[in-house]
Image (spheres, coloured by chain):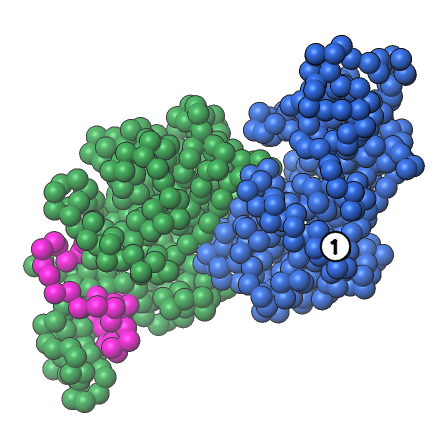
Chain colours: A green, B blue
Amino acid sequence: MEVTNKYIVIKHHVEDAPKQSNFELKTKAFALSVESGSDDIIVKNLYISIDPYQINRMKSYSSSQGTINFAVPITPGEAIDGAVIGKVVASGNAKFQKDDLVMGVFTWAEYSLVKEGNIIKKLESSEFPLSYHLGVLGFNGLSAYAGFFELCKPLKGEKVFVSTASGAVGNLVGQYAKLLGCYVVGCAGSQKKVALLKEKLGFDDAFNYKEETDLNSTLKRYFPDGIDVYFDNVGGEMLEAAVANMKAFGRVAICGVISEYTSAGKRASPNMLDVVYKRINIRGFLAADFLNVFEDFSTKTSDYIRTGKLKVIEDLSLGVESIPSAFVGLFKGDNIGKKIISLTEE
Amino acid sequence: MEVTNKYIVIKHHVEDAPKQSNFELKTKAFALSVESGSDDIIVKNLYISIDPYQINRMKSYSSSQGTINFAVPITPGEAIDGAVIGKVVASGNAKFQKDDLVMGVFTWAEYSLVKEGNIIKKLESSEFPLSYHLGVLGFNGLSAYAGFFELCKPLKGEKVFVSTASGAVGNLVGQYAKLLGCYVVGCAGSQKKVALLKEKLGFDDAFNYKEETDLNSTLKRYFPDGIDVYFDNVGGEMLEAAVANMKAFGRVAICGVISEYTSAGKRASPNMLDVVYKRINIRGFLAADFLNVFEDFSTKTSDYIRTGKLKVIEDLSLGVESIPSAFVGLFKGDNIGKKIISLTEE
């Protein structure tokens, strides 16, 4: 059997803020059968994860180049790959059977032809919605958990600041911090997001950075005694202001710097004199380095969700056609929580 | 008995590169006797440590303000204090006797009136020249030792880059790294310094940064496979270039950022995308936080000096009058090794 498969490509490298015109929806005849004994596996994609870091793979020169598996540059004209959950349609590999649910690095497409090496794991349990495994129970959750607990080593009562706090990772960092007993302030880009943080996610306070003219003073207002832990998703001026407001022995986890992904001119220049005198530790990390705590993260987080202590915020769009606007929207702050493309109405 | 005591003050706050005209030599009648039973101790100063960090205490607003003991702002018109070694002339405090050798935070002067709290320790041993206790066996040495070993956790064979490598701290970091079995490259500001690093101190390589036009390419040339450990004394563009050339899991110890002390416009903007993807750890520190390893540092370093494995580079000037030019010279790269003012010809 053969279908017409829809998939998304970039037309050319993307150097600045992404636009929908950078992307193209392509179609191609696609066989849903495989030769038995081959390693080929056909997956019908159900949920596609949309993540800001992908922009770094779309540049002509990528910092991520060659560093880790899923950070290989994306070639214009070829289907983009990323984290996806799908159902096996046909498999030449004896380890995978028709109807198996699998998560892995597949294409931004309706159907993907994958090899065993592209599959990260089978999803056996169905206690939670499948899509959770792309966000709160997947790499976003692990980023939040490992970046906060393993890197920042927070203590109960410490003062925590989170940027892009309504984003896929930030909202979880804030919730983990509250569960530990920290004082947590988040920033986001709209009043609606600020309300979500304070009213639904239990942040102690939150502000709309777009309404602030001097971030340094803003942070001084929210943290009169200084910040112990800054979980950075944004970089740029926010990182500078956070460093200026850190306490002695403050810890900064750099999870992402979305404000620096699309405009090289806006790099953060944190005051290194503060870094010295306040003995600040600034550390970049990737969730992939913390697979050793995955089990611990997964058990605790599942329990928090089960007992209602942790809220899951997802932002779904429907269909492969919606990928370009969903991706572009990440850089305009359109999403609230984890951005996911659903290809199913199950 | 009374003498005319000479001491050094700043006339006003110093915001930019220091000039000799910022300083003034003052004189004052000074009694060499104390009331018995008082806490007063009179010290004849023998060696005065001249350190770049003092510029931060001379600013109208200091980042170091209140953070630690010896980082209190300096008041214009009042004698500047810093690390000094001297001999007790008279003491009302029973713990200190005439002719005791003491190290502490005293004034930039011929004589200082001090309290017990200003004295860090008595110097009992005379195995090494007294001045070593202000440099290689004092806080500079501890900065090098703790910053390198404790923060950077270097491994034998790793690639180490040191800036201001002929300075008081940098030359020791490079020598410690060589003793551990690392590959070490230093940068300095003259051919004479470069020759010292390569020929006398055993650095694997060294370069004069003033002759380089693109530091990023320079570091790529010296570290084609990347840098594991960068010990930063300079900040600014060198820090940016080092971060761009770090290997995955590279460590950056920020000991000082002399290029940023005097010109706020030249702050480093390291590429945070590199920091994330290469999981770089940037950490500021103060030697004072590592007193727990002082004994270990002191024993090992004394042994290295005794056996000739570690060379001691001092740069002495004579007399209180020479302090302003010595201090100003630090920011022009005049000194080679530890800058010390000698007030004795013993």
Up the image or down, A245 lies above or below A148; here it is above
For the C terminus of chain A, give its image quadrant. bottom left
Q: Residue furthest right?
A: B345
Residue B100 percent across, percent down from the top left:
77, 29
Instruction: Examine the structure image and report whether residue A112 is included in the region drawn in magenta.
Output: yes
Q: Is residue B166 above or below residue B138?
A: below
Residue A323 found in image quarter: bottom left
Q: Quadrant of residue B310?
A: bottom right
Judging by the rendered image, the residue that carries numbered circle 1 is B305
Which residue does the image show at 49% across and 62% down from the upper left?
B248
Q: What residue lies at 25% left-to-right and 30% top-to-bottom?
A: A198
Indicate the secondary structure of the residue bearing disc 1: helix
Query: Which residues lie in the magenta part?
Result: A103-132
- Position of A244 with respect to B342 (left or right) is left
Quarter the N terminus of chain A occupies? bottom left
- Return the residue nearer the eye: B144 or A16: B144
How packed mark 1 is, by other alpha carbons closer than 10 Å (few <14, some 14-19, many 20 or more), is some
Give the amino acid at mark 1: Ile
Percent x, y of residue B10: 78, 23
Residue B46 vs residue B6, the one in the foreground: B46
Left or right of A89 in this view: B130: right
Label 1: chain?
Answer: B
Query: Magenta stretch containing residue A311, yes or no?
Result: no
Q: Position of residue B240 (x, y in %)?
A: 60, 52
- Residue A295 on image: x %, y %: 23, 58
* Depth order, front residue of B108/A273: B108
At 10% from the left and 76% from the top, the residue drawn is: A98
Q: Residue furthest left?
A: A346
